Image (cartoon, grey):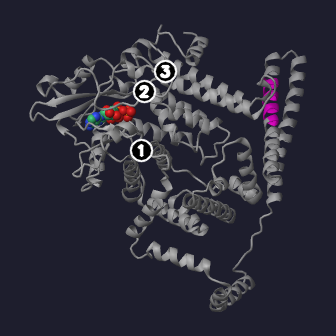
Amino acid sequence: MTLENALASVDSDVVGDADGGVVVKKETTPKAFVNAKTIDESDFEDVVVSEPPLNIERLKSVGTIARSFEIWSFVVAFVFRRVFIGVKWSYKGGYTEEKRIARLERLASWLRKGLLRLGPTFIKVGQQFSTRVDVLSPQFIRELEKLQDRVPPFPTKLAKEILDEELGGPVESFFDNFEDTPLAAASLGQVHRAQMKATGEQVIIKVQRPGLKEIFDIDLKNLRVIAKWLQKVDPKNDGAKRDWVAIFDETARVLYDEVDYTNEAKNAEEFKKQFTGDDWIKVPRIYWEFTKRRTLCMEYAPATKINDVEAIKAMGIDPDRMARLAVEAYLQQVLRFGFFHADPHPGNVAVDKGDPEGKGRLVVYDYGMMGRIPSQTRDGLLDLFYATYEGQSDSAVKALMKMGVLVDTGADLTAVKRTADFFLTQFDARINAQKKARETNKEEFEAEFKAPRTKEEKQQVRKRILSNIGEDLLVVSKDQPFRFPAEFTFVVRAFSVLDGIGKTLNKKFDISEIAAPYARNLLIEANPNSLPPQVVTAQRDWLRRADAQTKAIVNLFKGPDAIYDIADTMRRIETGKLKIRVRALEAERALDRMAIMQGVTIQALLAACATNIGVVLYVSSLTLYAQCAFGAAGLLAFKALTGQLKVAKLLKKENSILGA
Ligand SMILES: Nc1ncnc2c1ncn2[C@@H]1O[C@H](COP(=O)(O)OP(=O)(O)OP(=O)(O)O)[C@@H](O)[C@H]1O
C-alpha cells in the first residue's frame, strides 16, 4: 500500500476491503440497543463500522512494520492537515473564520473515521480524548463523542474457544443454552447470554476480542513515540498544560485496565457496595468462578435503555423521576464516594421495574472505565459548589486550590479572584433570571441571560467579558496557574451526558436545579459543624435586605476592627515587614515581546553570517560545507520568522482583548 493509498482510504466514506477488510458505511447515530433483543445486521445499517475490527489474525497478516506504517501515515496526514488549517493563503477565495471552522469540522470528522478504521486501540483512545476539553477544541470533542464502538461481532466459534481456554474446559460443561448470537458487540468484546448449569440462573458472558492485548502492545508502542514527539513540537506545551507523555501514560493505564476483565468485575463489586441498601439502583452480580482476564460472567439483568422514553412510559414508569435518580446517583458517586462510572452513556444506563414498589430503578452496565477522585479534591469540589451557590469568589478560589485546579505558581491571584468574581456574579444573575422566568412564565428574563447561539450573540458576550475583565484574563493566560486534573474531564463529560439524557426524558430538565440542593446536603453531611444552608441563606437574604440604618449599626461595630487593621498594616509597612508589589502589566508584556525580538535579531544575524560563510565556501568549491552553511542559515531564518510571527500574534491577542 502506498502512502497516497493509505491516506486516501482513510478519508473516504466507502472503503474497499482489499487489504484491510475495512467497510465503512454511511454514518448517522446508531440505534439504541434494547436489551431484550439480540443484535442483528439492521443495527449496523447506518453506523460507521470497521469490519472486521483489527484482530490478531489481521495483524499477523499485515505485520508489525506495516501496522506501524499505517499508524504513522495517519498521524502525519493528520498533523499536515491540522497545520494547514492555520495557513491563510491556502483558503480558496480568501480566509474567513467560518471557512476555518468548517475546515476544522471536516478534519474532526476525518479523524473520527480514521480512528474507527485503525481499530480498538484508537477507538478507545478517541473515546478517552472526547472528554479532554482541556486538550482538544470543541469541534474535535463533538466528533469524538460520536465514537460509538458498536461494531459487528466476531465469530461465536472464536468466542467459545477463548472461553474454553479461560475456563479450562468446554463451555457446554459449565453453561446451558449458550446463545450464539450476541446481545451486543463492542470494540473490546461481545456479550452472550447463557444459563448456568449448576444453578439454572440466567447470566451474561462478556468475551474479549481475540488478540486485543497484542494489538494494544504494538499500537501503544507507536503511540508512546508519538506522544514524546508531540511533547517536543506542540507549541502550546508548557510542561503543565499539555503534558503529552503524562496523557499517554494515563490513556495506556486505562486501556490495559480494560483489557483485564477481572478489574471490571472488581469495579462492579465496589460500585455495588457503595449503593448497598438502595433499592433504586441495580448492579448485576458477578460470578467469579467464570470471570477471568478475557471473560466476565454476570447476572443477566435485562432492562430498557434510559433514553427510550416511550418504552419507559409504556412500563408505567415516570421518566422524569428516572432522570433525577440518574443525576442523584452520579452526584453520590462523585461527591460522596469518589468512585464513579466514567462512561455513563445511554447504552450503559437502563431502567427496569425490579424495585419493591415497582416505580422503576436504574440498571447500570459496563464497569470497564471508572474514575476516582481523591478525598481532598472531593472536599474542594463540595466547597466550590457551595462557594458558587453563595457567590463568594474568595472561597471559590480557595476551593479551586484545594481541588488542585489552581496551582500555586507564584501567579497573581488578584486577577484570578476578580475573574472568579465576575463569573460568579454572571452566574447568579443568570440563575435568578431563569428562576423568575420559571415563576412568571415570562421569557423576557430568560432571554436576558440565555446561552448565546448566533454569531452576534456570541460576539456580544465576548465583548462584555473582555470589557469587564480583559486585562485580568491576559494576566491569567500568561501566568497559567490552572491545571485540569484528568479525573475532572470524565466528570464534566458525565454531567453533560446526564444533562442530555435528562432533557430527552423531560424537556424542562435542569441539572443544576437537582445538583445544587443535593450538593448542599452532602456538604452538611460531610461537615456537620457547618451551619445548615437554610440558616446561611436566610442570613444572606437578611443582609441583602438590610437597610442603610442597619448597615450603619453593623459598621459601627465593625469600625474599631477596621481601624485596628489599618494601624497594623501601617506598622508592618514601617517595619519593612510588608512589601507592596506593583505589577506594571503593560511593561511586563512589552518586556516579553522585547525578549522574543532580541532572539529574533540574534537569529537573523546568525542567518546572515551563515549565508555569507556559505557563499565563501561555495566559491571556494567546498560545496558540501557550503550546503551545510546554507542549511543552517535557512533554519535560523525560519526560527527568526516564527519568532516574528509570535510577536505579531501576541500583539494581536492583546489588542483584541484590550481593545474590546
Ligand atoms: N448484566 C447484563 N444483563 C443484561 N444485559 C447486559 C448486561 N451487561 C451488559 N449487557 C448488555 O450488553 C451491552 C454491552 O455491555 P458492555 O457495555 O458491558 O460491553 P462493552 O463491550 O464493555 O461495551 P463498551 O466497549 O461500549 O464499553 C449493554 O449495553 C447491555 O445492553
Discs 3, 1 touching: Cβ within 8 Å: no
Residue type highlighted by circle 3: Arg
Q: Is residue 191 above or below residue 505?
A: above
Callout 2: CB less than 8 Å from ligand 1: no
- Where disc 2 sits, the SS reads helix
Mark 3 and mark 2: Cα distance apart in space: 9 Å
Q: Where is residue 14 in the image (x, y as percent from the top left)?
A: 53, 14
Which one is in front, 448 or 244?
448
Residue under label 1: 342
Q: Is residue 367 visible?
A: no
Q: Residue 120 carries which label?
A: 2
Mark 1 and mark 2: Cα distance apart in space: 18 Å
Indicate which label's residue lies in the foreground, 1 or 2.
Answer: 1
Q: In this view, does 329 lie above or below 422?
A: above
Residue type highlighted by circle 1: Ala
What is the magenta range? Answer: 628-641
Which one is in front, 594 or 170?
170
- Where disc 3 sits, the SS reads helix
Q: Residue 194 carries which label?
A: none
Q: Earlier in the sequence, mark 1 or mark 2?
A: 2
Q: Where is residue 148 in the image (x, y as percent from the top left)?
A: 45, 30
Discs 3, 2 touching: Cβ within 8 Å: no
Q: Is residue 544 left or right of residue 508?
A: right
Residue at screen point 45% across, 21% down: 49
Overall secondary structure of the magenta section: helix
